[in-house]
Image: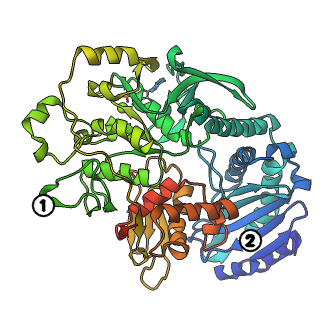
Amino acid sequence: MDREYLRKELQRIDGKGYPAYKDIRGRYDFSAFTLFIDSVQGDPFAAPSRLRVRIPQSVAGYPSHTYRNRSRRVGLENYLLHSFCRALRKAGRPRGSGKSGLMQADQPGQEMLERTAMSVNDEYVEAQFMIGLPAQGRRISGSIAARMLCDELPNVVEGSLIHRNNDSALITRYCAVSEDADFLRTALPGKGLVAFVADGSVLPRISGIDERPLRDGRVVKWRSPEEIRVSFNLPNAGRVSGTGIAAGVTLVVGGGFHGKSTLLEALKRGVYNHRPGDGRELVITIPRAVEIRAEDGRRVSGVNISPFINNLPFGEDTSAFSTENASGSTSQAANIMEALEMKASLLFIDEDTAATNFMIRDRRMQALISKEGEPITPFIDRVQEMYTFYGVSTILVMGGSGDYFDVADRVIGMDVYRPRDLTKQARRLAAEFRTERRREIKEQCGPLIPRIPLPESIDPKKGKKEVSVKIRDHTHIQFGTEVIDLSAIGQLIDTGQTRAIGDALWYAKKHYIDGKATISEVLDKVMRDIEREGLAVLSRRPGPDYASFRHFELGSALNRLRSLHVRRG
Ligand code: ADP
Ligand code: MG
């Protein structure tokens, strides 16, 4: 079947009832590429139909250096997806009832993730997209459909996916930026670093809801203090220099509105690569870095929070702590211990989103409320142990308490968006103005206790449906009858990740949650399957729009499932 066959078919069903569109499912040879019509919507108002185009490399023409390793391939795929989305958007327009006339693909953001919507290999370029098959009311507009699929689509493909019609200098840049970022991330531990911010980086964003770089005359580009400056030789950009943040405890201080949170936000997204022009292309952190917040109201299932919380009223056991409604401090403790269970090696904490009583208790409060009446061992008394005992570094934004000078290995001060190394001054002040507070440690942190999720507590069933997993929005997954709230997962940054994680929960339950495997083992197994077979392995249907995610975000979703029950491993 070829393009003319499809055109005739569409003309044949013109004016018929919408279900006749089902006849066009299948595969069509368009000579320059193959069109796959994978699924056809049931009516003009339903989720649009899903299609793919596959262009052989003999036509697409991408030189192998643009995809010869994973880093470069992901760079190229992100470039192509931007280009494809732009061309589709231009071609699509309302042409009838409901979603008639819509043409779109999964839009990437500032981060360059792997996405099922675009894949490039030695044989072909494949792009996945959606079309609103056109109708007037519920009658098929066959001629319009023929124009969309047989004339406009080939133009979109020709203009946006063929190498010679694309900007090859920009493609090279996407590949290079992605490769350099991955190179840097791998090179950090060799220098004892957990993060790097290159000179010239632009950290601030347009707004709290727009991740594009702030472009404003007043943007202050990053310039490293000399004391903590390091350099790297990158495969493409050559020698770059900037701030190296060493393993251990790093404190970020400074006046309000001086750029502390902006720095932490950039670092926390440094586990991902950024597209050229983003400003954070060379703001890089190690992969096992996790943002920690207070998240009152969350559910907690059998987590050992005893390093931080003991002697709760009514004598609850905090070495396997469960609650339907965590407080600010218990939720933050659980978030930390769960991150450790998933083998985090760097924590980000911002005072803006932390529970004050979890972070500090000063001398006066210690005098007023005796240790016996206070279940919390504040983070200040554990942060060094986090590093020496568990090997977990912390980067902490704290403009509100100088008590932390006593426990920080490094103090970075933000002064009108300019970083300074204030370690020496902070040490001197710590000696000069003693806080007189007592460390509140009775016992060392114990070993981590692994948890085993119980299969019967994870149920995707809803009504008559055996499996019902839906994404409400970027931070809410409906799993069976319950809704998982992911709004406190700061490094979940893309709806494509949320879609993949929703299905990964079902996948994990189906294949690996057996009442024997620990949470950490289950996560490893799911990630290994994705690594081997690609993200689409998670899907129950053809053509899902997924974006790559980390095991931390998957585990965080599992940990927030309200029905979850665990036993000790
Ligand atoms: P803090 O956490 O220190 O109170 P923020 O990081 O929230 O401050 O930054 C305050 C404001 O300054 C934000 O609107 C942010 O976009 C802006 N900003 C941050 N860094 C820069 C910079 N390097 N240049 C210009 N504006 C910036
Ligand atoms: Mg702040």
Give the crowd class for mark 1: few <14, some 14-19, many >=20 residues within 10 Å.
few
**Which labelled disc corresponds to residue 37?**
2
Quarter of the rendered image showing ligand 2: top left
Whichever of callouts 2 and 1 sits on the residue coming sooner in the sequence is 2
Tell me if the residue at label 2 has its CB under 8 Å from ligand 1.
Answer: no
Q: Identity of the amino acid at label 2?
A: Ile
**Residue furthest left in the image:** 368
Q: Identity of the amino acid at label 1?
A: Phe
Could you tell me residue 505's position as x and y percent?
A: 50, 67
Question: Which residue has dot 1 on it?
Answer: 314
In the rendered structure, the answer to whether residue 467 lies left or right of residue 190 reads left
Q: State which quarter of the image contains the N terminus.
A: bottom right
In the rendered structure, the answer to whether residue 225 lies left or right of residue 153 reads left
180 up-or-down from 328: above or below? above
Q: Residue at x 80, y 38 (%)?
A: 167
Could you tell me residue 530's position as x and y percent?
A: 63, 62
The quadrant where residue 397 appears: top left
